[in-house]
Image (tube, helix red, strand yellow):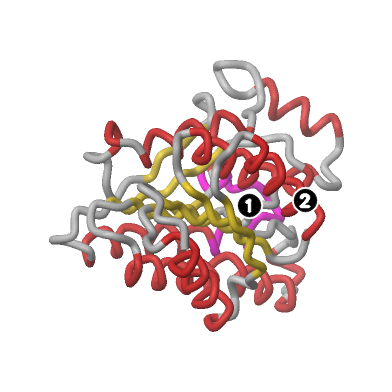
Amino acid sequence: MIRATRVAIVTGASGGIGGKVIRRLAADGFATVLGYAGNKEVADQTVDDIQAVGAPVRAVRANVTVNSEVARLFDQALDAFGRIDAVVHCAGITPLSLISKGDLECFDRVIAVNLRGAFIVLSQAAEHVANGGRIIAFSSSVLGLSPPTYGPYIASKAGVEGLVRVLARELRGRSISVNTVAPGPVPTDAYFQGVPEVQIESLRRQPPLERLGRPEDIASMVSFLCSADGAWVNGQLLRVNGGLT
């Protein structure tokens, strides 16, 4: 076991935003545990990048919809580093479908990964994060736009926002902050897969700051929330979107 001063678990850390988040926390001095579902090649590359700068890191494959696998993720973090100080739950999927289609397979899959997965991860985090720690879940600024085809996704993320508000109150007495980060459009493969270029250009023009977000923008907010400066922010929804909504 490596005794680390601060330890963070990041789920979905093989994704575009999750990958930047875990790299930023490693640069901030955290020992990190990379949770990923299936992309081992990207997960291994992320581990190599973090180790190259001398930061302790472990990768654990875990499906966030399976309670036993998430429990194993937390157990391995404790076995490796002896404590958990921050949990950042980035894992999620974004399949799109019109509500009028009644595609229950799509709906059930989104709810399973995005909402059930969040519930499982938040439950484990509430049990294992050290007093004074941080728990951060991800929603999306798309909730403020309510575009067609995003019904299942928005339903799942609205549920995540509700879980965070409740958990912040349930952890009274432990000095643990629980917050939600809601990025605006960020040009990652997961977000823009199949989206026409004309629609991407429209999204680029909408924020007053007149650009799309970058994974680094989101990682900076997570870094702030995990720092001493972010200790007084609790039970909040933070829209990181350049003023889009």
Relative to 198, is 126 on the left or the right?
left
Q: Secondary structure at mark 2?
A: helix
Majority SS type along the magenta span: helix
Name the foreground residue: 243 vs 99. Answer: 243
Over which residues does the magenta segment extend? Answer: 142-156
> Dot 1: what SS?
loop
Residue picked out by circle 1: 13
- Closest to the observer, 138 or 121: 121
Q: Is residue 204 magenta?
A: no
Kindly identify the amino acid type of the residue bearing the numbered disc 1: Ala
Residue 191 place in picture, x, y as percent: 72, 45
Q: Who comes first in sequence, dot 1 or dot 2?
A: 1
The residue sitting at the bottom extreme is: 68
Q: Which residue is mark 2?
A: 42
Q: Which mark is residue 54?
A: none
- Residue positioned 33% across, 67% down in the render: 126
Q: Residues within 10 Å of mark 1 (few under 14, many from 20)?
A: many
